[in-house]
Image (cartoon, helix red, strand yellow):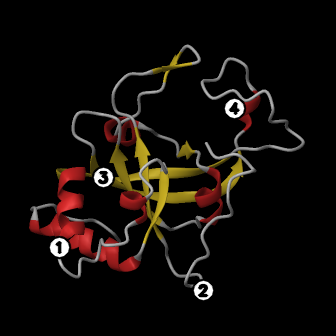
Amino acid sequence: KATSTASKPPASNDTSSARQYWLMKAEPESRLENGHDIKFSIDDLAAKTEPEPWDARNNLRAMKKGDLSFFYHSSCKVPAIVGIMEIVQENSPDFSAHDPSAPYFDPSSSPDNPKWSLVHVSFRQKLETPITLKDLREFQAEKDSPLANMQMLKLTRLSVSRVSPEEWEFLISVMKKNGDEVLLS
């Protein structure tokens, strides 16, 4: 989660209503936070029947309904882009921050002045061949790489990052070369 004292969201290069692209990290292996297992994988997202809330406030607040995001497994043996999801509801306050029994309870956040935000996402597809962090770094190192300035590779602790249209198209082409049928309609 990002607090209200965090920096402002990066300015979008396009002020129109054009679709934006994102990458959101999740931890697919069990880890306890405030007594709760916060494990969440692409398979967990696929099994959801309701949109899933996500929380990294500044970038989340820039997301619009219809934007697409890569689902990235983080803090695991093989970090990788493992799927695609769609933003189906724009940002709203994350009221779980006020619940002492919630894994990310924040006693300094109040319902009158919430520090935390979330968006709702919906599963689009799981990749047959994930694009690993090793793959991403190799692509980034190539001469004139479309991933040369990829935010996720430069700001590695950022759990929600922007993906430029060029980066998105490049990674979609990699998915297709890997044999994945990419469903973006």
Q: Position of residue 4 (x, y in %)?
A: 75, 50
Amino acid of disc 2: Ser
- Is residue 99 in sight in this rendering? yes
Residue at the spot 22% in from the left edge and 39% down from the top edge = 78
SS label for mark 2: loop
111 vs 38: above or below: below
Label 1: few (<14), some (14–19) or many (≥20) C-alpha neighbours in 10 Å? few
Residue underneath mark 2: 16
Residue underneath mark 4: 96
Residue underneath mark 3: 83
Give whichever of discs 3 and 4 has the lower sequence position. Answer: 3
Residue at the spot 41% in from the left edge and 33% down from the top edge = 40
Residue at the spot 35% in from the left edge and 35% down from the top edge = 75
Amino acid of disc 1: Glu
Q: Quadrant of residue 39?
A: top left
Left or right of 80, for residue 99: right
For the residues labelled 4 and 2, the Cα–Cα distance comes to: 32 Å
